[in-house]
Image (spheres, grey):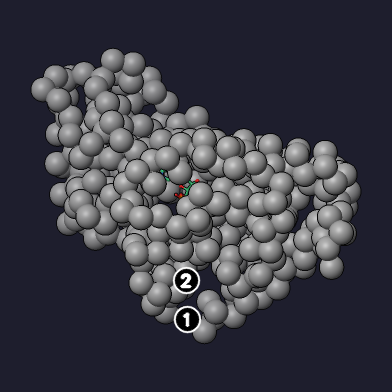
Amino acid sequence: MKKDQASKKPRVFSGVQPSHDLHIGNYIGALRNWALKQHLSDNIFCVVDLHALTLPEDIKPEVLRENSRKVAALYYACGLDIETNIVFIQSHLHEHAEAAWILNCTTPLGWLQRMTQFKAKSEQAASIGMGLLDYPVLQAADILLYDTDEVPVGEDQRQHIELTRDIAIRFNNLFGETFVLPKAVIPEEGAKVMGLDEPEAKMSKSVARNRPGHAINLLDNEKTIKKAIMSAVTDSEKETRFEHASAGVINLLTMYRALTHESRDAIEARFEGKGYGFLKKELLGAVLETLKPIQSKFNEIMADRDGLERLLAKNADAAREIAAKTLSKMKEATGLG
Ligand code: TYM
């Protein structure tokens, strides 16, 4: 389906779960890229609190409510312009849950059972709810409600965006052209930042909660960040070439490259033969330089709570205007309403 012809810019939509603290992987894999390219597109960024309920034992109600505000503030603090981006909280709109229900009815169960994130999370949890299996359908609803062209995300979301396309194609085939088909936009560098203490596994919010030294959180203080970087797993060599280094060293080099935008060649030349202590010190400098302005902007936004609430309410209205139109097309097409 063609998007509204009046808008020439592609529509971008993405989101983060407000579960636990955001880390440098979320920044490098997603948030930073949203800000870097914001002027090229028409943008909607959502704090997906309904998704954060899928592992409810993990997060207390008052913490979830507060985290949602913090994540919205971080979106802006990481560089999104307040005037030109719609930033809103998912549960402020009923349209997402309603659209997800309709899509549930056209999505084969087998498609959801195949999702690698579902398999991994369900293996770790003592007991799981239906929401965890249904998670990618709600994600598809988020994306499809806004006629989204591009979804900027980290590597771990690739499968969910492919599923979203499949869900859209199936719905269009069954009920007529309704949805724009979105595509994932995944950065070349830093699409999968690994754990500092376990460079074979992805840096993860839920792991970081129980394991100090696993991640660099965006709101961590200098001392904590220094400790995490200095104790990051490396090896007993001195190899700092991207192609030959061990997983831990590649992770440090990749983070450094993503934050400084220096070329691979320049980075390899700078660190050759210098030892990992030097690489870690330089990375620490780059991380602190990146996070300092983010933290001060975050504190400024959070200090004006009423202002933030007003902004989120205004943005929820703007998002609703778009989402309601798509939902009504979905209802019309399926014979509801
Ligand atoms: P979430 O909250 O797990 O992650 C938010 C974003 O950060 C990226 N990311 C990473 N990138 C690089 N290295 C890492 N270690 C790393 N960890 C996370 C993720 O790829 C993501 O872009 N299902 C989504 C939330 C969601 C969504 C949506 C996203 C719900 N609806 C609609 C896009 C569009 C999620 O759990 O992200």
Which residue is outermost to the top?
Answer: 244
Q: Secondary structure at mark 2?
A: helix
- State whether label 2 is within 8 Å of ligand 1: no
Q: Residue furthest left?
A: 236
Measuring from the top left, give residue 256's x and y in whole percent: 33, 36
**x, y percent for residue 38:** 62, 50
Q: Nearer the viewer, residue 188 or 147?
A: 147
Q: Quadrant of the C terminus?
A: bottom right
Q: Against 100, is 318 above or below? A: below
Q: Which residue is mark 1?
A: 305
Looking at the image, which is closer to me, 225 or 90? 90
Q: Amino acid at mark 2?
A: Arg
Q: Is residue 222 left or right of residue 298?
A: left
- Badge 2 density bin: few <14, some 14–19, many ≥20, Cα 10 Å: many
Q: Secondary structure at mark 1?
A: helix
Q: Is residue 320 above or below residue 205?
A: below
Question: Residue drawn 66% across and 52% down?
Answer: 104
Looking at mark 1, is its residue's CB closer than 8 Å to ligand 1? no
Give the vertical position of 106 relative to 163 (above or below). Answer: below
The N terminus appears in which quarter of the rendering?
Answer: top right
Visible in this render: residue 298? no
Do the residues bearing badges 1 and 2 touch, measured as CB atoms within 8 Å? yes
Pinpoint residue 270: horizontal percent, then vertical percent: 28, 25
Q: Which disc number belongs to residue 69?
A: 2
The kind of residue on which mark 1 rests is Arg
Q: Is residue 188 visible?
A: yes
